[in-house]
Image: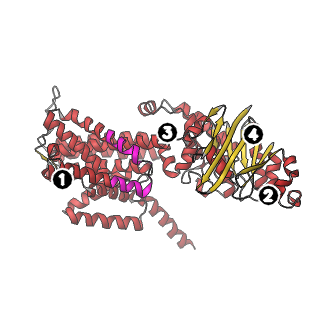
Amino acid sequence: MNRPSVKMFLLCTVIIMVVILPMLIRDPYYLDIMIMVAFNSILALTWRTIMRIGQLSFGHAAFIGIGAYTSALIVMKLGVSFWLALPISGIVSAVISLLIGFTTLRLKGMFFAITTWAFNEIMRSAYLIFKNPFGGATGLYGIPAPYHIYFYGLPLFSFDNKQAYCYLAFLLLSATVLVLLRIENSRMGMLFDAIRVDDNLAESIGISLMRYKCVAFAIACFFAGIAGSFYAHYISFISPYSFELTLSVDAIVFSMVGGLASIMGPLIGAGVLTILSNLLHATGFFKMIIFSIFLVLVVLFLPDGIISVPQRTKMLLARISKKGMD
Amino acid sequence: MVLLQTKNLTKSFGGLTAVSDLNIKVNKGEIVGLIGPNGAGKTTVFNLITSFFPPTKGNVIFKGEDITGLKPDKIAKKGIVRTFQLTRLFGEYSVVKNVLMAQHLRSHMNFWLEFLMPFSTRSREAALLQHAEEILNLMGLYEKRNELAKNLPHGHQRSLGISIALSVQPELLLLDEPTTGMNPEESKTMMQRIQNIADTGMTIVLIEHDMKVVMGLCHRIIVLNYGRKIAEGTPQEIIENSEVIQAYLGVPDAVAKN
């Protein structure tokens, strides 16, 4: 089989699994894991998009948080429908990311990491201090579920069970993957690569650094905001502690463990680590310990992440067979 | 026709004046050599022209338009592209991908069109690929097009650096020591290639230490010392200029030996 057909086969398998699994799995516990896999995948994918332009962000949770608070507030206070609030929260997140990006994207490496981390803390403190409208330390609770969807002649699609959320989560994930994949394979993706690999050279051949960095940052934060909106309405409760540094670090760990070289990396990383931490019933500090151990192991032994395993084994086998010949 | 002109171009780093009151002119179609001892400010002149840092004083005029202080990417859009003294490449990508990446300015990218209709750009991409291969042919890299840029030998990396600059299709090409670290044989090949580029009508400014290359290629030579222009003229005039010999060439024999 040549490569495209392998890809198509994998894609079809995944689609079928995602469509059928929620019907078979009726246990809310496993459905919850699946939903979190989708949410974490978006988190990791969008973080990688920022990494693609060579910017290490430690404040990705802030944009998830902005999406979540925006959506929760406009639905609860203004009575806007969730289906309208979902894109709006993405747009608000993207606009704020542009404001942040204009000032901070010219910073490189550690300096960008520190400013984004600081932004994360600023947002968290803002939610804590301004009790109106953010609700302070208790956060916002009782965030309503999305409205039912009626199809004429088809059964009601209602959000009183987790299956519906599961479908919605994977729908959002597929939209994110589709858009990011198109960008990856277009000229735009090439420009991002050029900027990451050598920004001086990129600039000297006419690539506007700030312009394309801002574009990548805004696209990433748009989808992060949408994921945040989904999160708020799924969990129905958000607080400043939902969007702490640990969530930003999660995004980094998922992507690094999976591998940064392709879009599959963050997907695999988020999938493996989310399922693993749930199977081990790991939460809070225990989860952080497991994630950190994974990160250390991957950095030491698999610097290109899980997606480099097939290539690595191939190289290893080649080396073994060579030794056998000698 | 004057393509590029600098007026009283000055750059100070703290107390050190790297370039002071430099007035140069480059005519269309010329190959101009920029020579001088180490630290004379040659690369600084390139950095000022391409706006990698702003001048302390003075102006850069390109095609009658003041381009001082524009962003480097805008300078490239105007038609000036430089190469680097230490080769800069997109190392982790293949040779042909390097050139394709650099075609950004002529690709006329329309993100939405490309995003919504992935097949609409096929023919344009094919034309760009053909253009990239022509450049690689010109620079003798066609056989190496699928190798990773970082795995190329030094000489080929220098050629690729120039290929990347060429793929922008500039009007003025600034080459920073194109033959550095090459043996005489490679040097000669590189000279031929630069001549080939010039034959396509390109205007070239060249920083170079290898006198054989400078004397063989350049129509006109500008000599810098301590950031000042000390001489300007044809290769013959430069060889005979006593100030230049004193400052840079040292003993008159040095030229003859080369």
The subunit carrying tag 1 is: A
Q: Looking at the rendering, which quadrant does residue B5 occupy?
A: top right
Residue located at (57% from left, 50% from top): B94
- B151 magenta-colored: no
Q: Looking at the rendering, which quadrant does residue A258 occupy?
A: bottom left
Magenta segment boundaries in residue numbering: A95-117
> Which mark is nearer the camera, 1 or 2?
2
Q: Which mark is residue A30?
A: 1
Q: Residue A187 carries which label?
A: 3
Residue where numbered disc 4 is placed: B198
Question: Dot 3: what SS?
Answer: helix
The subunit carrying tag 3 is: A
Q: Which amino acid does the dot numbered 4 rest on?
A: Ala
Same subunit: marks 3 and 1 = yes
Q: How far apart are the two marked residues, 2 and 3, measured between alpha carbons?
A: 46 Å
Nearer-the-camera pick, A42 or B240:
B240
> Which mark is nearer the camera, 4 or 1?
4
Dot 1 and dot 2 residues touching (CB under 8 Å): no
User: Residue B224: x, y in percent?
Assistant: 74, 51
Q: Quadrant of the C terminus of chain B?
A: bottom right
User: Residue A260: x, y in percent?
Assistant: 41, 54
Disc 3 crowd, CA 10 A, few/some/many (<14, 14-19, 20+): many
Reply above or below: A69 against A268. Answer: above
> Which mark is nearer the camera, 3 or 1?
3
Q: Which mark is residue B248?
A: 2
Residue B9 horizontal side relative to residue B72, left or right: right
